[in-house]
Amino acid sequence: MKMKLLSATCLLAFTPLYTSAQVIFNKQWSFQGLSEIVAFDKTTDTLWVAGVTGVNVINRSTGSFIGRIDTSSFGSVNSVAIHNGVAAFAIEAPTRTNPSIVQFYDTATRTLSAGNNNIAVGALPDMLTFTPNGGKLLVANEGTPTTYGTRIGGNVPGAAFNAPLPGNDPVGSVSIINMSTRTVEATPTLLGVPQFGNNIRTGVGMDFEPESIAVSRDGSKAFVSLQEANSVGVLNLNTNTFDKVVGLGLKDFSIAGNEIDPKTGGVVTFANYSVKGLYMPDGMASYQSRNRTMMVMANEGDYREDDADRLNVTASNVGPVNADLVGMRISNRDSIIGNPVTAGGRSFSIRDADGNLVYDSGSILDREAHKRGIYDDGRSRDKGVEPEGVELMEMLGRTFAFIGLERTTKGAVAIFDITDAENSRFIDMIVTDGDLSPEGLKGFMMDGKHYLAIANEGNGNTNLGSTTLYQLHAVPEPETYAMLLAGLGSMGFAARRRMQK
């Protein structure tokens, strides 16, 4: 009788994926200093933290300070991204309506890299990211105006705004930098791009303002959040042109699961109200679920800088309303009598590549913050916990989303398992004493271990901000682990039977 042994490869082929997992997190260190966006460089095992006047370089292992690159002579640094030993800085011009620059640094020497290292881009580059293969660098030029349009017809719900005077509102765009030549190969704008979906927010006295960029895994498309416009632009990276702008619609807070606490002060109570919310995402990410490209969006909400498009609810300005809604901040452009519309979804969402809503976290973020004693009731009437940043990581064959919450009384990052987008579920929340307002999140692997770096705009000790590093461990939930062992046992039994034949 000839005996056959199953190979390790064969065993792997039969090993089931974990159907659910938990995430264990352990704080490694915290570094105090100006902090907004954080990037990781594997070649030097360092974290690069952008914060207004420059970039701090930190030892990933110890959290110790290595050096600082001062950018104040060029302007304010808004973002940093790293690929293959090259760090790209998005630097806003001193006059923010002027063209700005992207600078390239060698991560080994922490000096300007060889070749073309200073590239002109659009006004107010707010975020930048490399395509997966590093061939292109995409820069979101927000182009925020210095002077906005004024109301037509007075401060009444539903009234539109005049466009600002020419020169006060630079056109929003995306600079596409070819990394082989270190040149801008295209700067697509959103002027005249076909529009689809609902509740695209126009007539607010400014044009489309790119905020954040997420690139598809194959590098063929980029999804650009147009936060104030409650929409997303779909950028074709084969043609370097926008295919479309998709309106994100409204979230209905009167539906079960979408409860809010709209009042400031008193007892925090979550309930349904006849109010709708503009999703208005800030941070975005992209991933694959069931072989479909998905967008993950942190639905922060945002008004104009001068707040001229914002209105406080009174007993009469939007018609009869529940007393709890008095004082709530709503959009005076999008609300009409009897139908108040506020900014933000107080949630994170998952949408397909066409912008169709697949999942929304409903009221989970606000509720979990309240459950943990970190809910900021002073933000109840505005946008709740204000989901800001998004980072995705794969562990144990599962995809996890990390959502930074800007408005809590302690630094907070929510964790969701989003492997199956339609059935996403809350896992846990990282709460850090001493940290406040996480803005940038960066997940990465080093020496076979998973880490999450959190850039916080504030902290409890100084006004500088902080960067905190956590090590992450994904572990199967007990019932999943039992199923896995049972599966392995069945495989072993089958293997023995084959051996006996």
Image (cartoon, rainbow, N blue to C red):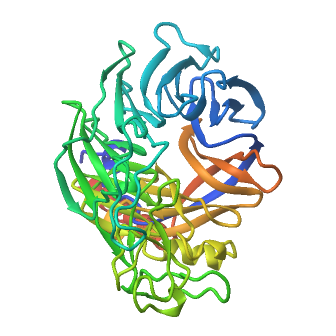
Q: x, y (%) of residue 277? A: 39, 72
Q: x, y (%) of residue 97? A: 47, 33
Instruction: Point out the image quarter for the C terminus.
Output: bottom left
Q: Is residue 29 above or below residue 362?
A: above
Q: Is residue 230 above or below residue 101?
A: below
Q: Which residue is located at x 58 percent, y 88 percent?
A: 269
Nearest the viewer among 490 and 338 is 338
Count of numbered circles in the view: 0
Q: x, y (%) of residue 255? A: 36, 85
Left or right of 360? Residue 450 is right
Q: Which residue is located at x 37 percent, y 59 percent?
A: 419
Q: x, y (%) of residue 423? A: 35, 70
Q: Which residue is located at x 23 percent, y 30 percent?
A: 240
Is residue 497 visible to the viewer in this orientation of the structure? no
Nearest the viewer among 338 and 124 is 338
Q: Is residue 350 above or below residue 120?
A: below
Left or right of 96? Residue 499 is left
Left or right of 219? Residue 264 is right
Q: Residue furthest top?
A: 115
Q: Residue furthest right?
A: 461
Is residue 91 visible to the viewer in this orientation of the structure? yes
